[in-house]
Amino acid sequence: MVIRGVFRFFVLLLAGLFCGQALGAVTITDARGEHTFERTPQRVVTLSWAMTEDVVELGVKPVGVADIDGYHTWVVRPSIPEGVADIGTRDEPSIEELAALKPDVIILANGQEDLIDRLEQVAPVLYFDAFSADHNNATVARRIFRKLGHLFGKEDVAEQKLAAMDTRFDTLKQQLHAHFGTDLPRVANIRFNNNAVVFVYGENAMSSYVLRELGLASALDIPPSQWGVTQKKMVTLSTLKADDVLLYFKPAPGVEKLFESPLWQAMPVVKAGHVAGVESTWSYGGALSLRYLAEAMTDALLTIEP
């Protein structure tokens, strides 16, 4: 009886241990399939700025991030916490510096596929297909944010932030109606490339999703593309009507010279004074960049006389 009791004790003890391990494990699906971690990753490295955004928004401080200076210029929000290591460029990170950080997981996104094999020699890699012509980039951004919330045990944070963002969309929409009235203007949103070429945001762009959430229609019909932008000649903007609005994203170095050109001055939307710059906001970012885009674009729109 004693032997049987001892045996039963050890069976229960082992069962408890295995159960504890199972409860601590977390499984997440990326673009390559399922990945299971024995425990919640603590030391995180992000090479994609969009993934950096997501991780920081969830309240997780990464140990390493790619191209922090560039992030501060183009992405801006959310700010990267103090003490995070810069491990090089997004397409050529320092493997030595990265390995020294001893990460539990390295998170990548589009354009970084070729790094997977090398990085997996350092730590487990998650790769997300965040941007594609075959899907709505904003919808997928929200889905990835939820997945990362699950990975880090931050599901509640993810849901609260997404809900707050949707509420914020409604508030901004009301501000636009208070400014413009019942009928909101059609809006085109672009980034300048040079004095002859612009990148126009199309149907599946993050910023176009924001326009729809704010009740605004697009002034230019641009089909989906991987990053949501299509290169067009500057003259394309001359098709915009006087009652449309043109928003361009900053930084836009050298744009003052363009604004002095006869081509620019002749455009109906320019003559009407319906052009405004949007403060630097990353338009290829994570889920919460949609909120920052909405706020920055609304601020710009409110400078336009109805």
Image (spheres, helix red, strand yellow):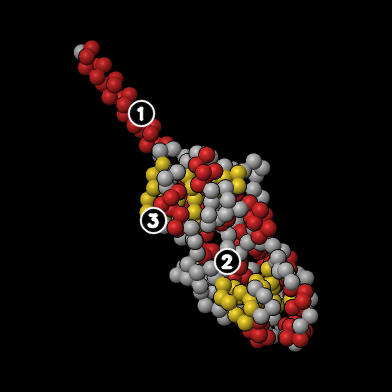
Q: Label 3: which residue?
A: 32
* Residue 228 percent coordinates (x, y): 54, 70
Going from the N terminus, do you reach mark 1 or mark 3 first? 1
The label nearer to you, 3 versus 2, is 3
* Residue 167 percent coordinates (x, y): 63, 58
153 to 191, vertically: above or below: above
Identified at 69% across, 62% down, the residue is 280
Instruction: Give the quadrant of the C terminus.
Output: bottom right
258 to 178, vertically: above or below: below
Which amino acid is tagged 1?
Leu
Secondary structure of the residue carrying numbered label 3? loop
Identified at 68% across, 58% down, the residue is 73
The label nearer to you, 1 versus 3, is 3
Task: Give whichever of 197, 81 is nearer the camera.
Answer: 197
Give the number of the disc on residue 206: 2
* Residue 177 percent coordinates (x, y): 71, 71
Left or right: 148 in relation to 74: left
Secondary structure of the residue carrying numbered label 2? helix
Going from the N terminus, do you reach mark 3 or mark 2 first? 3
Which amino acid is tagged 3?
Arg
Give the number of the disc on residue 254: none
Going from the N terminus, do you reach mark 2 or mark 1 first? 1
